[in-house]
Image: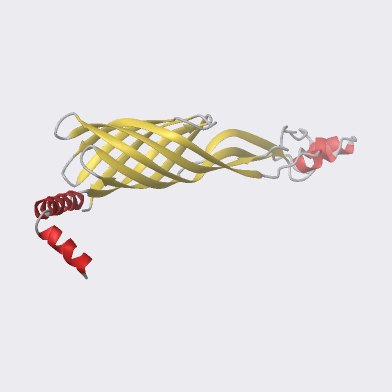
Amino acid sequence: GSIGHAFTVCIRTENQNQMSLVVASLLTAASGMSHADGGAYIGYKQQDFKDTELQILFVEYEHSFNKYFSVSAHVGTGLNDDVSQTKTDTYVSELSSTDILVDTYEESASVQHEYGISLNGYIPITEAFYAYGRVGYMMMEVESTSYPGFNIDTPPSEDPQSAFDGGASLCESTGIESRCGVSLDKQVVSEDADMGIGEIGVKWEVTNEASFMIGYSKSLSGDDSYDGVSLRVGVVFW
């Protein structure tokens, strides 16, 4: 009706220059967004979490707004079991034997999975090298294995049969832990940890499509101590 007609006239006359500027600005912004880079990294981390040395393999996606700022998200899994203690059980399988058997039980920890996001900033050093800083948030699950009931080793007698015939118990004769009231049952505990993470490092753009990064990270928040060194090899795929 009349309102629509008045609006059309307004655009065509008084605000024509302003509208042209708005359209031009939107086209410029869209053009800038179309040049934003997306890239993927495969990485390795050696990290110290609560005095446990853990190794992680991860993949990461990075979206770059320009050459100075980007956001990243990664997911990873553990590569190793860090052994904190090895417990040894020595025994003979039967009274008539003097062949000593040895079983070992390792108490260890490993990362089941890890997730994280970060906001990243880059400062050019040369055309190919950048210093970078990251601030983000990370979550991970650490699985620990222990044998809390196995606190002692009870080695067998030198002559198990003679010791038993002389009145020694089966525990004293054979050294078998189950006969000595010692539990060899494994206890597995999963712990979820989340924390703020800061990272600084250097990025080397080997080519326009490939890069290499090395950095040092440390916990910024949370109750658990964490620090680590990470390596990334990445490609830009659009």
Taking depth in this image into account, of 25 and 20 the one nearest to the observer is: 20
Above or below, comparing residue 111 to residue 24 in the picture:
above
Q: How many marks?
A: 0
Taking depth in this image into account, of 31 and 141 the one nearest to the observer is: 31
Measured from the top left, where is residue 78 in percent x and y? 46, 44
Which quadrant holds residue 144?
A: top right
Residue for point 41% across, 48% down:
75
Taking depth in this image into account, of 117 and 204 the one nearest to the observer is: 117
Q: Is residue 11 left or right of residue 173?
A: left
Q: Is residue 141 left or right of residue 70?
A: right
Q: Is residue 208 left or right of residue 223?
A: left
- Coloration of the structure image: secondary structure
Measured from the top left, where is residue 124 in percent x and y? 19, 31
Measured from the top left, where is residue 183 in percent x and y? 74, 41
Residue for point 45% across, 35% down:
196
Taking depth in this image into account, of 173 and 34 the one nearest to the observer is: 34
Q: Is residue 176 visible?
A: no
Above or below, comparing residue 43 to residue 217 in the picture:
below
Q: Is residue 186 visible?
A: yes
Q: Is residue 61 left or right of residue 115?
A: left
Measured from the top left, where is residue 55 in percent x and y? 44, 39
| Residue extending furthest toward the right | 167
Image quarter in which the N terminus is found: bottom left
| Residue extending furthest toward the bottom | 1
